[in-house]
Image (spheres, rainbow, N blue to C red):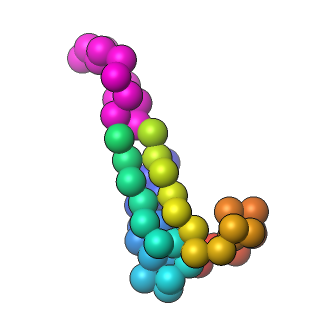
Amino acid sequence: MNQYLLLKEAIEKGNIISVTAAHTELPCGEDIDLDLNSIIVYKKSDQPFNAVLT
């Protein structure tokens, strides 16, 4: 499930300051899914637990 559009909308509204994705250091083959770590910086500390982000 791709959450990019929801994250982009939350950034435009100012609820999220930044989103960063980085790949893990584990080797990947063609048959292994790409594993990404996501870092989301929220404007307020209680927003990750809020049901309505956008």
Residue 32 in sight here: no
- Number of on-image labels: 0
- Residue 52 x, y percent position in the rendering: 70, 74
Tell me the residue at 40%/37% (across/down): 36
Q: Residue furthest bottom?
A: 13
Residue 4 in sight here: yes
Residue 27 higher or lower than 10, as above or below: above
**In the picture, residue 8 is in which quadrant?**
bottom left
Tell me the residue at 38%/28% (across/down): 24
Tell me the residue at 52%/63% (across/down): 41
Q: Which sits in the foreground, 31 or 7?
A: 7
Residue bounds of the magenta highlight: 23-36
Tell me the residue at 68%/63% (across/down): 48
Q: Which sits in the foreground, 13 or 33?
A: 13
- Residue 31 x, y percent position in the rendering: 31, 15
Q: Is residue 26 left or right of residue 37?
A: left
- The verdict on residue 34 being magenta is yes
Secondary structure character of the magenta stretch overall: loop
- The verdict on residue 7 being magenta is no
- Residue 2 x, y percent position in the rendering: 44, 53
Q: Is residue 27 left or right of residue 38?
A: left
- Quarter of the image that includes the C terminus: bottom right
- Residue 14 x, y percent position in the rendering: 50, 83
